[in-house]
Amino acid sequence: MYSRESGDQTFTFEPSGGLLNASLVMMDKETDSYWSIINDLAIHGPSKGKYLVQVPGSVKTTFGEWKKSHPDTWVLSVGGREHDARSPYDSYFSSKRGFRNTAAQDKRLDDKALLFSFHYQDAPYAVPFDVFEKGGGVVALAAGQQLFLYREKDDSFYRSTVAFLAPAGAVFVHRKGAWLLVRDGATVASFDPETRSFGDAAEPFVGFDTFWYIWSLTNKDTKLLKG
């Protein structure tokens, strides 16, 4: 999810109908500029060079999980059609090929290796799912600051990875089957797998799940974090 604010302007975004290395490109109604979500940047038009600002709060999930928490949800249908028996993306997800045979030039990972990707201090980063998909993992960012990521092995691709940045002076510790946030040897908070959070003790960290070929083609010199 992105803020409508960039610099001193407020934008109204909509899909452009175009893709950049198989990733969505938006456009704004105010300046007709094109914005790439894969590098958080306006790439063409009067707003070129301005940055998209990611904001926490959106959660990618399945409708089944959503309905459990929000049973009175209304669903908007198109032409009265409420359900497709077959997902048009099944063949894409099951294939090792990228969209229209697009392939990564950086061969450190397979084209369709799944990863959590983000920008931090103006540099692109990626963390492969196998670092944290079996119940959590920790990677180190600049100056040793820790990032905690969590998903479970059987999580659907449609369920978001959750990530948290450790506060200054605190670290994430795995102890007796639980993830803890610890400062000066004392437990500040424990991770709750049900809510997928440390309560208010750790700041949510924004990024998104994608394939290696999509991320690496646009974000050259990506720093791979392996835990």
Image: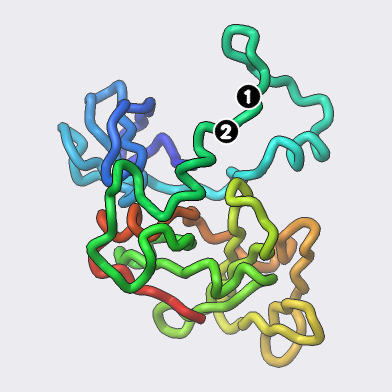
Along the line of sight, which residue is nearer the eye, 187 or 215? 215
How many residues crowd around disc 2 within 10 Å: few (fewer than 14), some, or many (20 or more)?
few
Q: Amino acid at mark 2?
A: Ser
The number of discs equals 2
- Is 158 rendered above or below residue 80? below
Q: Which residue is mark 1?
A: 84
Specify whether 26 is left or right of 144: left
Quadrant hosting residue 62: top right
- Is 92 rendered above or below residue 166? above
Q: Residue at x 50, y 56 (%)?
A: 206
- Is 74 rendered above or below residue 40? above
How many residues crowd around disc 1 within 10 Å: few (fewer than 14), some, or many (20 or more)?
few
Q: Are marks 1 and 2 in contact (CB under 8 Å)?
A: yes
Is label 1 in a helix, a strand or a loop? Answer: loop
Is label 2 in a helix, a strand or a loop? Answer: loop
Q: Amino acid at mark 1?
A: Asp
Q: Residue at x 75, y 42 (%)?
A: 65
Which disc is residue 147 wearing?
none
Along the line of sight, which residue is nearer the eye, 47 or 107? 107
Q: Residue at x 75, y 87 (%)?
A: 186
List x then y, in percent, for residue 204: 59, 59
Quadrant hosting residue 66: top right
Q: Which residue is mark 2?
A: 87
Specify whether 24 is left or right of 162: left
- Is 166 rendered above or below residue 117? below
Specify whether 136 is left or right of 122: right
Q: Residue furthest bottom?
A: 185
Q: Residue at x 33, y 64 (%)?
A: 124
List x then y, in percent, for residue 123: 31, 66
